[in-house]
Amino acid sequence: YPYISFSLGNRLNIFNVFIMVYLIIITLIRYNKLFYFLLFLLIISIVSIIPTSFHWKNFSYKSLIVKKEMITLCNKFVNNDDAITIFIKGYRYSKFLHFDHIEFLATPWVVNSFCSDNSINFISISNNIKVNENYIKNYKFKRSYKVNFQNIYLYDTFDNSFKKIKKKKLLKLIVAYEENRHWVFKINYLSNLIKFISKGKYG
């Protein structure tokens, strides 16, 4: 699915389904191999649905734990005199084999939806953010955040740790971040083409 790299999978799959149904009907009418086709369809369905279902359930359970911890952190700093910025490492997407699959903390409005205190700001670490002297800019979502780099924290969702960090550590985490949403990004010229077409938003 070349369009999944633009996060359009579910919205465009319906058109493929119409074509597939048409081809299946034509094949059945012409070759009259209904039993073998249904058997093949059953095997494909079992092989694809069961592992994916387990993956979704497992990630849903883990994401609830992360959400609960973020709410706890928010309550910890409520009514704090100074503005707090908490950077989130991990759980932007679920890991399905080698790919980043289910979206969770990837967008600013989701990562900040668990805290209503305006003095507390959650930012998900990714290669979409750029650090400047006193603020951070998310180029993908065109958002800027004023940050006091003397008062920043890191919540690591992988080992459930929370600690105060320095700006130098944050920069290293941003550089080290890797994201693999689709196999097409592993092919340099296709990745560059997508980046050009999307004006840097994807790729």
Image: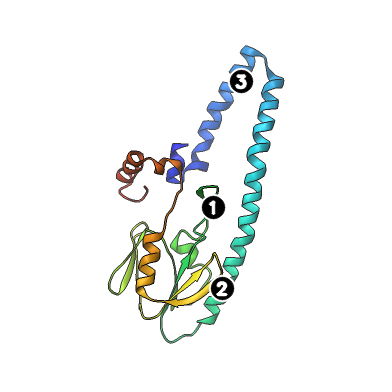
Percent position of residue 25, x then y: 61, 20
Position in image of residue 104 (x %, y %): 52, 58
- Which residue is at 53% across, 76% downward? 73
Nearest to N terminus: mark 1 or mark 2:
2
Q: Amino acid at mark 1?
A: Lys
Reading the image, the residue beneath label 3 is 25
SS for callout 3: helix
- First in sequence: mark 2 or mark 3? 3
Looking at the picture, which amino acid does disc 3 mark?
Answer: Ile
Circle 2: element type:
helix
Q: Amino acid at mark 2?
A: Ile
CA distance for labels 3 and 1: 36 Å
Label 1 belongs to which residue? 95
- Can you see residue 195? yes
Residue density around tag 2, few if under 14, some if 14–19, many if 20 or more, within 10 Å: some
Q: Select label 3 or label 1 by which is in front.
A: 1
Is 87 drawn above or below residue 47 in the view shown? below
Q: Position of residue 174 (x, y in %)?
A: 38, 63
Residue 69 occupies quadrant: bottom right
Direction bottom: furthest residue: 81
